[in-house]
Image (cartoon, coloured by chain):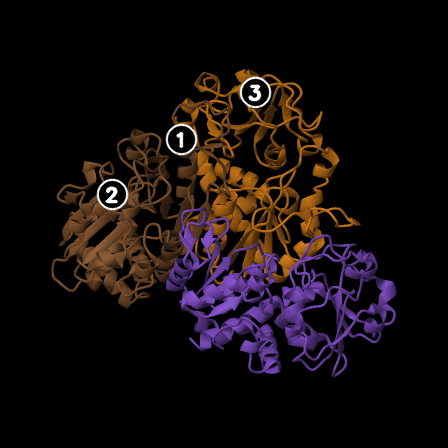
Chain colours: A orange, B brown, C purple
Amino acid sequence: MKQFTSVHDVNNINALVAEALELKSSPYAFQELGKNKTIGLVFLNPSLRTRMSTQKAALNLGMNVMVLNIDKEGWALELQDGAVMNGTTVEHVREAAAVLGQYVDIIGVRSFPGLKNCDEDYTEQVFNKFVEYCGVPVVSLESATRHPLQSLADLITITELKTVNRPKVVLTWAPHIKALPQAVPNSFAEWMCKADVEFVITHPEGYELSEDFTQGATITHNQDEALTGADFIYVKNWSAYEPYGAVTGTHPEWMLNNEKLKATNDAKVMHCLPVRRNLELSDEILDGPNSVVIHEAGNRVWAAQVVLKQLLQSL
Amino acid sequence: MKQFTSVHDVNNINALVAEALELKSSPYAFQELGKNKTIGLVFLNPSLRTRMSTQKAALNLGMNVMVLNIDKEGWALELQDGAVMNGTTVEHVREAAAVLGQYVDIIGVRSFPGLKNCDEDYTEQVFNKFVEYCGVPVVSLESATRHPLQSLADLITITELKTVNRPKVVLTWAPHIKALPQAVPNSFAEWMCKADVEFVITHPEGYELSEDFTQGATITHNQDEALTGADFIYVKNWSAYEPYGAVTGTHPEWMLNNEKLKATNDAKVMHCLPVRRNLELSDEILDGPNSVVIHEAGNRVWAAQVVLKQLLQSL
Amino acid sequence: MKQFTSVHDVNNINALVAEALELKSSPYAFQELGKNKTIGLVFLNPSLRTRMSTQKAALNLGMNVMVLNIDKEGWALELQDGAVMNGTTVEHVREAAAVLGQYVDIIGVRSFPGLKNCDEDYTEQVFNKFVEYCGVPVVSLESATRHPLQSLADLITITELKTVNRPKVVLTWAPHIKALPQAVPNSFAEWMCKADVEFVITHPEGYELSEDFTQGATITHNQDEALTGADFIYVKNWSAYEPYGAVTGTHPEWMLNNEKLKATNDAKVMHCLPVRRNLELSDEILDGPNSVVIHEAGNRVWAAQVVLKQLLQSL
């Protein structure tokens, strides 16, 4: 693997999951591989799970980790080519990325969308500039349109916990008070469309995802119908793709609760976290036996570790 | 040892001090013990000594360290059970703590009191939620009511430097301009009450500590009387316990200076730091031969290291 | 080497450069030297290159690294001796530095000038207090008046890339919109004055550097004349030394571009970064074949590593 920015960088997702589960059973088996190798984790936006799980994965592989909160410890980056930098930006991403690439063997980058300009976000202008200029393999720690380490951890979790050969997996929109990115649902959708699952997406009208990510999925506005017989329910809010970044309705009735679980196949409930309790998901679900959100968060380590292992092997 | 949140987690404080002093003479003797073990240091409030000394202690034991400034690098945590999270909090401590526990073997947590609501602080609502939900052993890096790593370092310092078998140790209130927590004096008091010392607390009227921490101590409002014959003087400001968090008087005459040292047994002067010079303690003391505050700060490493060693041994 | 705060701490700069280049070819040859040694990197101001390159250098030597952003993670330091600390400063540098010295074997400190009070900055009041009170060897990560790790990396770069025995090196002032410190040009000047190069400084009237740093340099206000026959051009903005910290003129015509390169000996263009594109340096230079700024930034690792190696050897 030469980079990890989406499912398209993976040859065989089932083999990748199998290898991740091997690492989970022998976390320290490849410490020679990472010896004297360094990963730089560059955060343009805050992070808890991604930071800690990727750091842990790298340490398991014997790597060194350097964390840079570029927004807090660094300075404002210029992204526009040709800009006359006589304003507030202090360094161009061309230099910042290229310099970071001098100090590390692999770079992880987190960069959220602005949710103002669809084209800017969906062409991944910030993230792709790091990829273009840093000169070393890049791992996405979540970009404007995707969160592939999360999606891989989700597939690992489904593979571990499924009780039928081809489980029904339902991605359901959930209420929120803020306009959130589409990165997690986009990414989950494109991974599930390639996985051995029956994949259904359900959301209120107006919350259609970009079709680039949902080819092959069944899409419905009827949440009850979608949940019927579900083995896994993936709960997540997102803002509208059209009009871009809009909150086109609040739909509090879309919050998952135990009542809605009744029609499922005793479905396991997933969420990428952080989750707003009693807004996206009820306490009764999160504190009940169907929630697997902590287990899922734990699998972030093995998702990151298998990716870093493959990147190290191709250095 | 299964956790380290107060002196009550310690079977034998003298044995713990003796073991700490052994580690001080052989800092790297137990590096196999911490191999592939990770401690997460979670700061809800700023730290210098505690962060650096605990990190150094963990490194001495061969551990990996991950630091998370959750207030700055993360987001606002919800602490209230049952909350409908439609406001400014982004993640509930139930998830945040449980997820962190997935990535580390031991968690250190620092959480200051609000000094508004005595019951909330003295039941350690924030700190105890981490203990309850993280699923791994917790070390206090200072909580609302206690700072046990500081107190252990203090006892190590007294044990090292004492010139009589049972020294007289005086905790004296000092002036300040802000309302400070009672955590350090509470904790120091409950450790000294169990140590082989003659322990005296002196403070102006109105600054009585909670009796839960001072059983067995001699308490007086007469600073001169308290200092007479003292072998160690522990200088510290704190706000009132009743009315909770109040600054009930400034009492500049309580600042320790060389004149007040005359009645002591050439007492060594301690302070947990940071110290406000010429407000809590005069320059002449801090720059003179009686101050042991830097030596005391250095002992923070061995306090942390012996605690981490015992926690590692019980994993 | 006992400390590294300026070129005056170096016996033989050519031998130091040669040793740095040996480390560049065998980065991991001295990992036993740094085993169980810790460097603390203390930032009173933000950093990207210096933080990452020094961390990488320390890791290459087998050291542990602890980073402290004292302005963000810590609190305001008092610098004035004798101060009654009843204001906003929480800890005196005497204690802060001495305590840090308890936890690490070497300290790196970054402290920018205020650019208000020349005497305060040029006597290095902040930086020197760390040196005085920390009790361990100090590496400058840039102080008010010097940036010696940058200058050493610059000399390494010139030594690697020169095509004539005694290259002509020109330090040229560049336009900017802010008042910048004189640390980089001061430091570059005092290193170049000791190096085997023909050294010329050119700047508009009013931007004279302190003579303490430029003894032996040719100084001219005629940029064209200075650039003629140049082998290396070091581009940098700085504010006036007299009146201290002033921006006495903007001089947009001083920006380097390809036209100005024509009179040079196909000069290599250097800059310490961050650089403001199309203000200090044109895109055509930075994206063209003459720019060596990324290579130069990469050499920051070997500059830091040779200095840390020598400090470790003298512990």
Between B237 and B23, the one lying in front of the other is B237
Image quadrant occupied by the C terminus of chain C: bottom left
Image quadrant assignment for residue B177: top left
Residue drawn at x 77%, y 57% as measured from the top left? C249
- In the image, C154: left or right of C2? right
Between C299 and A90, the one lying in front of the other is A90
Could you give the CA–CA distance between mark 3 and mark 1, rounded to whole angstroms? 33 Å
- The amino acid at mark 1 is Leu
Closer mark to the observer between disc 3 and disc 2: 2
Any part of residue A294 in sight: yes
Residue C289 drawn above or below residue A48: below
Residue A255 drawn above or below residue A216: above
Closer mark to the observer between disc 3 and disc 1: 1
The x and y percentages for residue C51 are: 55, 59
The x and y percentages for residue B208 are: 22, 38
- The amino acid at mark 2 is Asn
Q: Are marks 3 and 2 on the same chain?
A: no
Residue with the mark numbered 2: B186
Residue with the mark numbered 3: A226
Q: Secondary structure at mark 1?
A: loop
Residue with the mark numbered 1: B79
Q: Secondary structure at mark 2?
A: helix
Residue C130 drawn above or below residue B237: below
- Provide the chain ID for the residue under circle 2: B
